[in-house]
Every structure is written in structure tokens, then in C-alpha cells.
Image: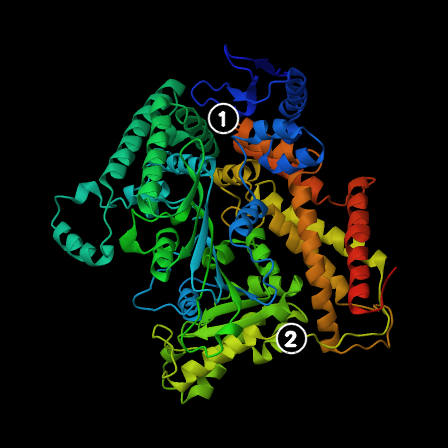
Amino acid sequence: MIEYKVSKSKNKGRKSWSINFYHPMIIDEKTGNLERIRRGTGIEEEEKVDLIIEDLQKLINDISYHNSAKREVAIKQGINEKAVEIFYRDIYINNSHEYERIREGYIPIDHLKAHKRIDIEGFSGAGKTTLLEQLLGLDLQGEKILATSTNKTTISNKEFIVSNEKDYSIVCIFKEKAKIEKYVKELIEGAILETIKNSTYDVIVRSFLETNDREFRLNYILGNISTKDKSMESSGYMSKITKYEKFEEDGTENNEELEVLLTDIISYSEGEWREYLKNEDVNIDKLSKKRRMGLEIKFIEKIMKRDWCLEFVEKIMSLINTVIHRVLGDNLIYKEVNKNGWIDFIFAEKLDRKSCLKILESVASNKKNLFGQIITPIVESIRTKGPFIPRFIEKKDDYKFIFFDGRGLDHILKEAFSIPPEIDEKLRKADKILWVNDASKGMKYDAEKFFNHIEISGYTSKLYMAFTHFDKIQGDNFYGIESKVHHIVGNMNQVLELLEGSKVENIKRNLNDKLFFLENLHKEVNKDSDSMIIEEVKDLIHKLKSPKQQGTLYSEPLKYYEYLFPIDLIESTKKYNERWDALLGFIEDQSIKALPAQNVKALSRRYAELNSLSYDGLSPVGDMQKYLLECIYKLVTKPNYFQKDFFISEENKSELVKIIMEKMSEKIYDVCKERILTLNRQTELWYRAYHLRRGEGATELRAEDIKEINRFAMPSYNISDENIEIKRFTNHLIKEVLQVVFEEVNRKYNTNIIFE
């Protein structure tokens, strides 16, 4: 491996030193070479600069540091902080803890112990946002500033802190420029791929405007592109299509400049693809699917280095930045603008209600008629504080809530095997979890994944359910409120019955008095509203305010056997690796579809560069967490396993399991994240998978890298091996997770759990 050197220099007339080096993680896309970096230190003492250089060379030449997630690791290991700052400055993507630090610095909530943290979850169109607007006391006509469309879901997390102060404040954090630039490149790559695959124009447009995981939507910021087939423009159908489009577009304007950009991308791609195939001397129609895919990947990697392609990236980024500054304007807002002219975050305080809601609409809305002037896709998170209190609340001093609102779970639960870590993090920090469901449409079976995660993570006692659109349940077989409620509960039970074993009854028992049936939420709820509307909403608020109920805990000795755990763990690691081997194409499984090449690449990019733990329903960390929690849950739900005459009521056992599993969940998350991302050679392998695997055969090599990552994270048992890794892993889980949690529960709750 080449060892890169760091040098120092001093410009004429300058007293402080600068540092020069080639950055191993920043590649000049035109030349393919490492980019030369020059950084001022502001330090005059040469000895201090030499210390920085010494540690900077460690970071440059040790590939284990080549991931933005390793920034904190470097600091903890005593690497010079200035060296860390210089090395990670241009490649660092914040994680959730850093975003929280910014929010907490401007609008702190840690001290609000009396406030109940309510996380609102559910499918798109269920009425989550409408219910939230009621709980925030928003005027549903004049203050309709949050997104409510069923097919354009919320894509950033929002927090609303209810306060009795008269003024409002808001802090909004934006995704880093480097992150948005990578999304833009992904969109251009997608458009090029669909072009050379001869896809229809509407498919190309969709690939250009929206990433596969729907995490980034360019049309929100820059407007739409007409998907009319150019060949039909002279056809007799056009007058009819144009007539109906007037109703469908709902005031949405197409961005002609963006359309011209896409037309150029298509034109350049088609021309270069023909030339490429000619130079390769191949007949594309006679190639195997695998060979063609390899050629397409090689071509896209080559074309993305072209000057015209890089200019398109710069042009789109410039358009995005222009929209950001135009939308935010020059209001009395504090803006943290970095050296690239990119806004890191905004903060405003002492606002009146109208001003606060206007800012909130610009950063949180996704109304279709605002496409081209909203910046939601580049927003990481929003926290706002103010007197968000409904008019019908009489004791306003007692209305103390922090509401968490996020994206709809349709796509996530449909595609994912496990709950993404980003969702789990919200669930973990909430005091209450409010699942919102459209009563008129029934509960989707995909919801089972969510409820399973709730139970195995120990969150069941937090769970509440609100069924909206109760007034829309109609039919000859419904003869009153009671029959409608029976219908809703019956449908809910059908979904819960998909769960295994005692999970079903545990959740049903918990929900006994936590179901709410809401109607006409689109109307303002006030003291004069129909009795059912006002009473159900008030009852919901009362239950959400109520302190957590602690059930009776079993005080007699409960024994868990250490030697039973490895048996189930071996099965869990086997299932995890078989699932991912099928996803990566190493084995065939009728129930699992192998991932397309672009998904393997996108996933490796999320882990190597974007500090993101999931992509389009894929999450090694989330899957590992699910398998391990299921394994531990199985152990925890069977105390005194060999004692035949042992009896503990289901209520007592359920209460204890919830307490144990909530603590287990937090520790297991840390174990999974560490073993997938940072331990051993994991950082190096993710870096190699995304950055160094190029050309034909890149997908297979990436898959090999991810397989190696998985084999270390969840080592499998092999009857012919010494199985050193799985023994170490088992011992770590027993000593650092199971044993520690059981001891913590004994100390805090005065239980008598024995683990031997």
C-alpha cells in the first residue's frame, strides 16, 4: 500500500503554517486521482504543526479511519483534534446524535421532565398529520401548513414542544451539501441507467426526480417535469389528456429548465452508449443479462466522470441552493452558513404565531401546488416550540407534550424485513407511541412487523392506537357505534394474530383501554363539537398525559440458564446469514429476491459515506437487531425452564419481559451498530465495497465484501471449525448484555433474577 506524506508550507508574509496532503477519500472525478488538499492551521509554532502532521498521517494511511463514522473513534483514541478536524472536514456527515446536539443547543428539551414525549406512527393517509394538527391546536383551514397527502409522505422528522410562553421559536437543520450532492449524482445515474435500458420516458423522469428509497425528491425543490410521451404530441388524444391534466396537476408548474437538463442527459447518454458499444464491439441484444448489467455499470462509472456530467451535478446543486435562499429569504432568522454558501441550519426565536408557521410551512410542507418552492427533501429535522394548545383545553398549564412526527411507514413496512434503526431510535426515546390507523380502510397486514418490533423491544406498554375516519365506516351490516367498534377491533386482531406465541395476548392485554375512535378530524374540535368527537379526543389526551402504569412484578426467584442461549443464537446467526446470502445472490431462496446491482451499490454508499443505516428497506443493522432480540426474547419469556411445577401469571411475566427487553433493546442496538460498522475491518470493507469496486464484476465483489462484513458481525457455527468467533460473540453477549441487564433490573426493581 502506498504511504502518503503530509507536508507543511508558509505563504510569503504569513506567520501561520498551512498543511498539504492528498486526501484518500476525496477523488477528483475528472482525473480519477486523489484530490490535493491545503488547509490553514492558524498556528505559528512549528512544533505544534508537526504534531498535527504526525497524527494526520496516521489518519491518511490507516484505512480503518476512512469512514465518517470513525470521527468520534479517532478523538477517543487521542488523535490530535486539529488533525481530526482537517481530515474529516470535507467528508463528514453528521449522525443523529450531532443533530440532536444542535437542536438541544437552541431549543433544549432535556430539562422538560414533566412533558410527555409522544411519537406518532402509522401509514400514509391514515390521518396522522390531521390528528397532530388537532393536538397542536392548529386552525385546519387557515393554518394547514403540514403535509397530509396520501402519496407524498412526510420525509423529515419534526418535533413540536408545547409551551405556555407567548412566543414561538424554531430550529431547522439541513442535510449536508456533500450528502445532497451524492443524492443528485444518484438521480443522474438512475436517469442514465434507465436511458440505456430503453425505458419509457416517464420511468426515466421518475428515476431522475426521486431516489429508489424515496429519501430524496428533487421535484419538491425544483418542480416537476412533464411525463407526456413526445411521440403523442400530435395525436388526437392530446386534447383530452391536456384537459384532464389541468385537474390532476392542481396548480403544479413544470420546471422547463430541469426538463432541458434531463433532455440533455438523455441525449448525451444515448450518444455515448452507442459509441461505447461500438468500441466494445458487442451486440447488446445477444448478451446475457449478467454481461449486460456489467457493461451498464462500467459505462455509468465512466460517464459520471465526464465534464458534461459533472457540470450537470453542479448546475442542479446551484439551482437547489438558489431555491433554498429564495424560500428562506432575508427574514429575521439566524442562519449558519458554511464556507460553500450552504445553510447548515436556521434558528429563529421570539416569533409570533404567523411568522413561525410561515417558516414551518416552507421547511415542512410537501403540498403539490408548492412544488418548486419547498425544501423539505434537504431538511434533516425540525424542532419548534410555542403555545400549541387546542382551544378546548381548559387547564392549559397541564398541557405538556412533545410530539414527534415522521414519515409514513408504507414503503418501509412493505419492503423491510426489520424496523429501520432510525425509526427504532424514535420509538426508544418516546414515553408513548401512538399508532394511527384509518378505520375505514382496515389495518394493513404489513403492520405486523411494527407490532412485533414493539413487543420484542419492550415498548408494548407505551403503545396506544387511534382509529381515524370512524365516520366513514358504512354498510348495511353496521347498526350502530358498537358494531363499528367490533369491526375495527376484529380487523386489528387479525393483524395481531400474525404474531407468534404470547406476543399476541401481551399486546391485546396492553391495548385493553388504549383504543380511541375518532371521526370528523378535518373539522375544528372545540367545546361545541359533537360529544363523541370532543370526548374521544379529550380521553386520548388524558391517557397520553397519564403516568406510565407499572404492573406487579414477580418477586420470587426467576432463573435463566446461560447454556440455553447459545443454542438459539446459533440458529439466529444462521438465519441472518442465509437471508443476506440470498439477497446478495450467493444462494437461492424462493421467498427472497436477489438485490439489483444498483441497490447493492446504494446500500454500500449509505454505510460507507452517508452515515445512514438503511436503504430502501435494507438494513444489516436492523436485521441483526431483530434476530438477536428474537433470540433473547425467547430466553426471557421462559424463566425456570426446567422447573415443571413453576407458575407465573401471564400478566406478571409480560410486565417483567417488557422491562427486561427495553433495556436489552438499547444494548443490542449498540452491539449491532458497532459490529456492522466499526469493529475489526468493517470500516475498511464498507469503504472498499463502495469506493474501490469498479467496472464489470463490481456487484459480485461488493457482495463478497458485504458477506465478509456479515460473517464477522454475526459469525455462523460450523461443525468442522473451532468456531472461535461465534464463541467470542456468544461470550460477549452473555457477559456484556444479558448479565448486565439482569443485574440492572434486579437493582432498580428489586427483582430476584438469577442467570447461571
Q: What x and y, as percent, mark residue 259?
A: 25, 38
* Helix, strand or loop for disc 1: loop
Pick whichever, 749 or 303, lies toward us. 749
Q: Quadrant of the N terminus?
A: top right
Residue in the picture at 64% in, 30% down: 81
Residue in the picture at 57% in, 66% down: 115
* Helix, strand or loop for disc 2: helix
The type of residue carrying mark 1 is Gly
Q: For marks 1 and 2, give the CA distance.
A: 53 Å
The type of residue carrying mark 2 is Glu
Residue neighbourhood size for the residue with mark 1, other residues' Cα within 10 Å, grouped as few (<14), some (14–19), many (≥20): some
Q: In which quarter of the image is the C terminus?
A: bottom right
Question: Is 550 drawn above or below residue 288 in the view shown?
Answer: below
Write down the residue under mark 2.
Answer: 505
Q: What x and y, as percent, mark residue 85?
A: 59, 30
Q: What x and y, as percent, mark residue 332?
A: 36, 48
Pick whichever, 618 or 371, lies toward us. 371
Write down the residue under mark 1.
Answer: 695
What's the colour scheme?
Answer: rainbow
Answer left or right for 255 relative to 179: left
Sooner in the amino-acid sequence: mark 1 or mark 2: 2
Answer left or right for 360 relative to 585: left
Pick whichever, 77 or 637, lies toward us. 77
Residue in the picture at 15% in, 56% down: 243
Q: Can residue 418 be seen in this view?
A: no
Q: What x and y, as percent, mark residue 438?
A: 43, 71
Quadrant housing residue 724: top right
Question: Is 478 drawn above or below residue 156 in the view shown?
Answer: below
Residue in the picture at 46% in, 59% down: 410
Residue 17 image label: none
Residue neighbourhood size for the residue with mark 2, other residues' Cα within 10 Å, grouped as few (<14), some (14–19), many (≥20): some
Quadrant housing residue 588: top right
